[in-house]
């Protein structure tokens, strides 16, 4: 069975991204990060436990996380979302989420550094890289799950239409400032290029059969 070919942005996707709500946009960005992490995981599994592995894909993935998540998604949350929860019953949750962003940035910086030359120097560095990745992965899974099951629905239920609309405009403006006017196209192209260089040919690569 032919796999759905990647490398092409389906019609309607770019227009649809402009139509979805700000919380759907944030959730979609979580999905982007999941796909980046899946590509990293795939590459790290292929790398085995020895040193001298080509880690260019990991390095590129870290750069993408910095650009698309750290400098965009996290900034939107830190400047326009978390402050709105600081005097509410979700203040503690907002504080933990904010702290996790700090730790995520530190872990990504360390992973980017370890993968910089395209090859880790020895087995212990490879093990460190894998451990950092698992820590990052687990933290992101929990972080995004709490945002999507608690924070985002509360926003949709308590913010006015105008406030949500204003947030959506800020997201679009910020994204365009970072990536230019074809921001969606650029982000998806970067993601698909990363998946391709990680050796992923499509969604079906992840299909598992019950044994
Ligand atoms: Fe967050
Ligand atoms: Fe988030």
Image (cartoon, helix red, strand yellow):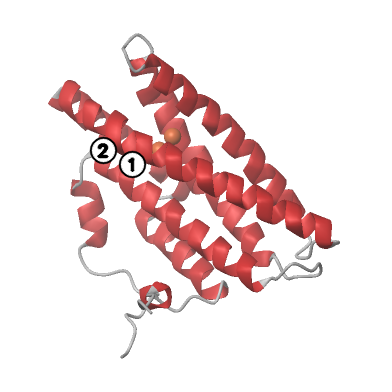
Residue 154, horizontal then vertical, whole percent: 23, 26
Give the residue furthest to the left: 161
Secondary element at image label 2:
helix
Give the residue furthest to the bottom: 1
Q: Is residue 96 above or below residue 61?
A: above
| Residue 171 horizontal side relative to residue 106, left or right | left
The answer to which quarter of the image holds residue 211 is bottom left
Residue at the image position 33 percent from the left and 41 percent from the top = 26
Q: Nearer the viewer, residue 11 or 211?
A: 211
Give the residue furthest to the right: 121
Residue 184, horizontal then vertical, whole percent: 36, 55
Q: Which residue is mark 1?
A: 26
| Residue 61 horizontal side relative to residue 148, left or right | right
Q: Which residue is mark 2?
A: 22
Q: Is residue 48 above or below residue 58?
A: below
Residue 143, horizontal then vertical, whole percent: 44, 37
Q: Is residue 73 visible?
A: no
Pointer 1: residues within 10 angstroms few (<14), some, or many (20+)?
many
Q: Which numbered tag is attached to residue 52?
A: none
Secondary element at image label 1:
helix
The answer to which quarter of the image holds residue 158 is top left
Q: Is residue 79 visible?
A: yes
| Residue 207 horizontal side relative to residue 164, left or right | right
Locate the N terminus by quadrant: bottom left
Q: Is mark 1 within 8 Å of ligand 2?
A: yes
Residue at the image position 37 percent from the left and 53 percent from the top = 31
- Quadrant position of ligand 2: top left
Q: Nearer the viewer, residue 187 or 50?
A: 50
Badges 2 and 1: C-beta atoms under 8 Å apart? yes
């Amino acid at each position: 069975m032919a796999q759905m070919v990647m490398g092409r942005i389906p019609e309607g996707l770019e227009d649809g991204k402009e139509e979805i709500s700000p919380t759907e946009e944030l959730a979609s960005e979580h999905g982007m990060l999941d796909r980046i992490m899946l590509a990293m995981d795939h590459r790290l599994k292929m790398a085995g436990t020895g040193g001298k592995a080509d880690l260019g894909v990991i390095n590129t993935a870290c750069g993408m996380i910095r650009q698309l998540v750290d400098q965009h998604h996290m900034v939107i949350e830190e400047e326009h979302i978390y402050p709105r929860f600081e005097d509410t019953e979700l203040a503690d949750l907002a504080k933990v989420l904010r702290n996790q962003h700090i730790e995520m940035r530190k872990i990504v910086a360390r992973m980017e550094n370890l993968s910089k030359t395209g090859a880790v120097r020895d087995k212990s560095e490879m093990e460190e890289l894998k451990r950092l990745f698992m820590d990052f992965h687990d933290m992101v899974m929990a972080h995004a799950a709490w945002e999507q099951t608690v924070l985002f629905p509360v926003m949709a239920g308590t913010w006015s239409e105008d406030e949500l609309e204003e947030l959506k405009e800020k997201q679009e403006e910020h994204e365009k400032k970072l990536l230019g006017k074809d921001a969606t196209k650029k982000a998806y192209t970067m993601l698909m290029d990363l998946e391709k260089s990680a050796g992923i040919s499509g969604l079906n690569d992840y299909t598992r059969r019950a044994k």
